[in-house]
Image (cartoon, rainbow, N blue to C red):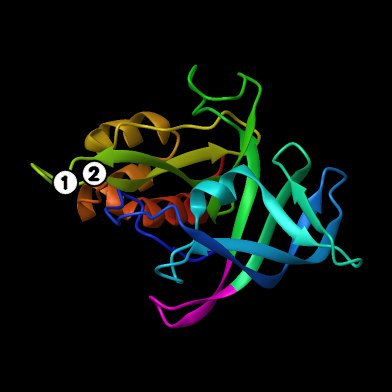
Amino acid sequence: MKKFLSLYILTCTFIFFSKAEKVKGFYVTNNHDTIKALLKIPYNAAFSIDFNFIKMQQEMEYINDAGEKITMTPNDILAYGFEYYDEREEKDDTMVFVSKKNIFYRSTDFSDNDSTIFLMQLVKGKLSLYNYYSMSSVSGGFGSASNNVMHSTPVLEFLNQKLFTYNTNKFKSEMAKYLADCPIVLQKIEEKNYKNKHLHIVVELYNSLCRK
C-alpha cells in the first residue's frame, strides 16, 4: 500500500460525528480464505475524505447477501481492505487493516492483555510497517473549547516477530539498534539524513537491500 498519511503526528482535528459509506472490499478469515464483501467504512461526516480510523481499528462491518449488517472484530478475522480514491494524491489506492496483538493496551482500556486490534498496513514485506491511531484532548486556550487531536504512531514488525515502536525523537539511534543487521541501510540513513518522516523510505530500502 502506498503511503496514505504522514507517519509522524497528525494535527488534524477529529470530530466524533461520523457516517459510513458502502464500498466493495474483502476480508480474510482466520482460515486464510479471502472473501469479497460490501464493507461499511466509517468517516468523519464533516470532512468526507477523513476516515474514522479509531473505529476502523476496533471493528469492521459488512453487508451480507440478506442485507444484514455483520460486525467483525480483530479476533474474528485476519485482515480486511478496500479500494478508495485518495483525494489528497488524486489517485486510486487500497487500504488494508491487519489484526495484530494490541501492544497499546492500557489498564484504563475496556480490554485485556490478550486483546487484538486492526492496524493500518502501509508496507508488507520482510519488514512491515503499520500505523496505530489514538486520540488526545488539546486545550484551545483560555475561553476556548478543547479539540480532539488524532495521532499516528508507526509500528514495525519483522516476519512473525514482536511489534516494535520507538522514540520518534531518537530516530537514528533507534534504527541503529533495530536494523543492526543491515549496515547498508544505516549508512544511507546517515548519508541522506533520514528522519522519522522518512520511515516509509527506510522500510522500503530494508526490504530491497537486506535479508532477515
Amino acid on which disc 2 is placed: Ser
What range is drawn magenta here?
A: 84-94
In this view, 151 is above or below 94: above
The picture places residue 55, in percent across and down from the top left corner, at: 56, 48
Give the structural element (helix, strand or loop) at label 1.
loop
Amino acid on which disc 1 is placed: Gly
Could you tell whether 143 is left or right of 53 in the image?
left
Give the Cα separation between the discs numbered 2 and 1: 5 Å
Q: Residues within 10 Å of mark 2 (few under 14, many from 20)?
A: few
The residue positioned farthest toward the bottom in the image shown: 90
Q: Main secondary structure of the magenta part?
A: strand
* Displayed quadrant of residue 138: top left
Does the CB distance between marks 2 and 1 fall below 8 Å? Answer: yes
Q: Is residue 15 visible?
A: yes
Q: Tell me what residue is drawn at x 53 percent, y 32 percent.
A: 163
The picture places residue 127, in percent across and down from the top left corner, at: 53, 45
Q: What residue did someone put label 2 on?
A: 146
